[in-house]
Image (spheres, rainbow, N blue to C red):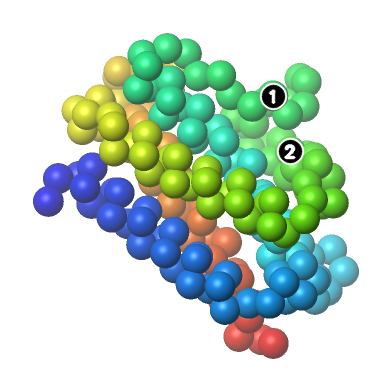
Amino acid sequence: MSMQTHILAALREEFEHWEKVLANLSEEQITRTLQPGELSIKDEIAHLWAWQQRSIARLDAGQNNEEPRLPQWLPGVSPESEENTDVINAYIYESFKDRAWSEVYEQWRSGFLQLLKLSEAIAEPALLDTGRYAWLNGYSLADVLLGTYDHHQEHLDKLLARLNQE
């Protein structure tokens, strides 16, 4: 099995796991918070979707051999710096908190499917080459996909732990 096939299989499995978990929850479970300061599942999905847009932009740029057009969140605040993560996440929450669950879910779902489609269309050597895209600063597009997988898995682990406490 090629590395690309392996990465895509892991991403599809992650997507299917999310789909299964979400399908077994009511909208009330998805939209409520259990404790003050905690995000609802809907808010978590909006968070994942927002960050996913950066991955999609990178994959699209890689496929088209151009610079990525990354989402512009907050002027002067770089999402590349971990010190800005909390500020950006707060901005994402404020931007999406009033959207309906159906809209948030459809955006996340279609974004994930788009990410998979773009990933399938990129030749494996281009996906794995750490020097091909200067704008990735020594990372490969495969690293972008692995980051997406890790981010979704991190939030899924927290969600499953939360559901086990209910």
40 above or below 97? below
Mark 1 → mark 2, Cα distance in angstroms: 11 Å
Residue holding disc 1: 72
Would residue 48 be visible to someone looking at this image? no
Q: Image check: 75 left or right of 139?
A: right
Q: Residue furthest left?
A: 1
> Please, what is the three-letter code of the amino acid marked with disc 2?
Ile
User: Is residue 133 or residue 117 the one in the foreground?
Assistant: 117
The percent coordinates of residue 35 (x first, y second) are 83, 74
Q: Secondary structure at mark 1?
A: loop
Q: Image check: 64 left or right of 72?
A: left
Residue shown at 84% from the left, 45% from the top: 94
Q: Image check: 133 left or right of 147?
A: left
The percent coordinates of residue 149 (x first, y second) are 43, 52
Residue holding disc 2: 88
> Image quarter for residue 30?
bottom right
Would residue 51 be visible to someone looking at this image? yes
107 above or below 58? below
User: Is residue 161 or residue 40 the one in the foreground?
Assistant: 40
> Please, what is the three-letter code of the amino acid marked with disc 1?
Gln
Residue shown at 48% from the left, 60% from the top: 153
User: Is residue 143 or residue 65 the one in the foreground?
Assistant: 65
In the rendered structure, find residue 94 and report the number of the disc placed on it. none
> Image quarter for residue 129?
top left
Q: Residues within 10 Å of mark 2 (few under 14, many from 20)?
A: some
The percent coordinates of residue 46 (x first, y second) are 68, 50
> Image quarter for residue 132?
top left
The percent coordinates of residue 23 (x first, y second) are 56, 73
Quarter of the image that includes the C terminus: bottom right
Residue shown at 36% from the left, 39% from the top: 117
